[in-house]
Amino acid sequence: MRIEQSIVRQAARSTGISEEDLVLLIAEGEERVYQQDEWIFYESSPRRWAGIILEGELELMRGIHGTSRKVGTIVSGSMISEGALLEKDSHSNGAFTRTGARIWQITEEKIESFKENNPELFYRIVAQVAVGINRRMRMLADSVHCKSNSGDLLISGLRREKDSLGTRDVYGHAYYGVQTLRAMENFSISGIYLNNFEHMVEALAMVKKAAAQTNNELGTLDDTRMNAICQACDEILGGELHEHFTVDMFQGGAGTSTNMNANEVIANRGLEIMGYNKGEYHHLHPNDHVNCSQSTNDAYPTAIKLAVLLSSHDLICSLRVFRNALASKGEKFKDVLKMGRTENQDAVPMTLGQEFSAYAVMIDSSISTMEQTAEAFLDINLGATAIGTGINSPRGYADLVAKKLAAISGFPVRRAKNLVEATQNAGVFVRMSASLKLVAVQISKICNDLRALSSGPRCGLNEINLPPMQPGSSIMPGKVNPVLPEVMNQICYQVMGYDTVVSMAAESSELELCMAEPIIAYDLLHGMMILKNGCISLVERCISGIEANRDVCRSYVQRSIGLVTALVPVIGYEQSAAIAKEALGTDASVYDIVLAKGVLTKEQLDDILRPENMTDPREI
């Protein structure tokens, strides 16, 4: 396929590389098509290729710990991941396409070949690429700096706010108010704030927008206030104002501080939209207007459910990538004969491909479990207000707000059948936590196996090689550890521990409310986040680079006593048992003894040991 000259010309102009040089560089590339809402690459993942965007737009995202931000957009005709030409480093940003994209890609292998064959031309191109990357990084740094420091000039200004406990000074630049300030002081616990979980912030904005629209339609909120609240919520959904969600995730009050943090940020931004100053709450009040027809006890758990649904979508996507990577290795290793093991003892032969294919099926079952559990999160108690009776909300509010929220969120949420039950029963969170524990157990089992199969290299199984990622010891030269499976094990242990906490927190529900929902929210959202990030790292930095030690695997089969099991149908149990006993007594291999005794010819024995004959039922 040829790239349109206009695209080449545009890419050359944006990078400073001459058209002639660029054409030579990309000659060995190929087109890759990405679907809508697909990640092109993740932040911190290794660079695998350099490319040119043929069609579509890519959004550059920074931050993988729940606070990702859009830092730029790259359009067709631009080079992407050109840092792969410089050195084997990692992506400093992630890239994502909302509408789909076509990218012409030159793999790292092709780049290395081009470098060897055209060193002078290669380094001329690299010089221009380095200049372009430096310029773009300065622009991105300026952009991030400006966003993170917006309003800093106002930090010396203060405004006075009051609540039922008295009056306090709040920084003039802050969109949060006095109740959030008190919560920040009361709950300086973990240093992990609400804005670390962007899906939770987004979910709160969705709830507040749906409530404003419903209140307006039912006549309890005027058009001006409704429009201001909705615009503020839309800005939050667009990634703005997240830094003002400052309450610690560990908090008392069953989520009241989180709810008020959202109410105050939305109210103060809404006031600006209406032409007033922050804190002039008689025009737009956090409680009277933003929180109209709501209580923390229905708004907060509904937001948690939405955040969990959004996070589960991210986790399921990463699990699919994990599943596909394992299935790919299963196909690649389908002809690698090895010994299966039960209770850490030799069993019977199998293929390494069967082992990895089984792992892929395990992850598939995890995905199915996650999807089934997510269905229960569509039942929401928004409209229940304090305890489920709907006090202080207009007639018809609960049904209508569920419809509004479904339209805003994209999830087919529905009013719970019994709002009193839904307000006090945290059982659905226990179900999701149990599903996450199942995912963690299965992933951890796989990682245990990867560590065992790669053990050695001289004094372990050494059946597979994991990519060497870093020196493994400060004292033992040459040692390399399986660090990615190890960190994934630890992630899984944390998620398993979270399951116990979620169970205890849900059990703590007394009478009409579960007071411990904040820790449930933290454990579920953080558990999903670290599982998602762990899966991405494990695939990119470990699974994709696994290689089989074919000769080692086959030698174990030939030396294993378990090999005689495959010979029983051919030479009989008694003779097989005698050969096994002799092999154990002499340390000779079953393979060599069978040949030495003339029990079978080498051709017959090798035929039995063919992978397709060893691992599938057949006629003897």
Image: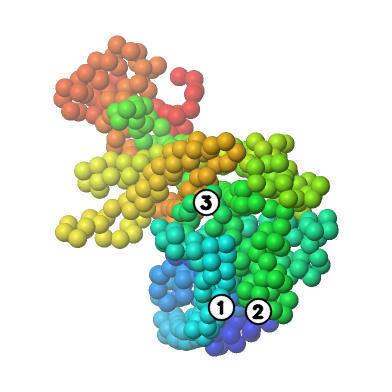
In this rendering, would 219 be left or right of 406?
right
Mark drawn on residue 37: none
Q: Residue at x 25, y 19 (%)?
A: 579
Residue 42 visible to the viewer: no
Among the two numbered marks 2 and 3 on one chain, the one whose residue lies closer to the N terminus: 3
Q: Which residue is mark 2?
A: 277
Classify mark 3: residues with Cα within 10 Å, few (<14), some (14-19) or many (20+): some
- The quadrant of the rendering that contains the N terminus is bottom right
Along the line of sight, the residue nearer the viewer: 64 or 510: 510
Mark 2 is on which residue type? Asn
Q: CA distance from mark 1 to mark 2?
A: 10 Å
The residue lying toward the viewer, choosing from 554 and 283, is: 283
Q: Nearer the viewer, mark 1 or mark 2?
A: 1
The residue pinned by badge 1 equals: 159
Q: Counting other residues with Cα less than 10 Å from the Cα at mark 1, is it few (<14), some (14-19), or many (20 or more)?
A: some
Residue 219: name its quadrant: bottom right
Q: Quadrant of the C terminus?
A: top left
Residue beneath disc 3: 253
Q: Are marks 1 and 2 in contact (CB under 8 Å)?
A: yes
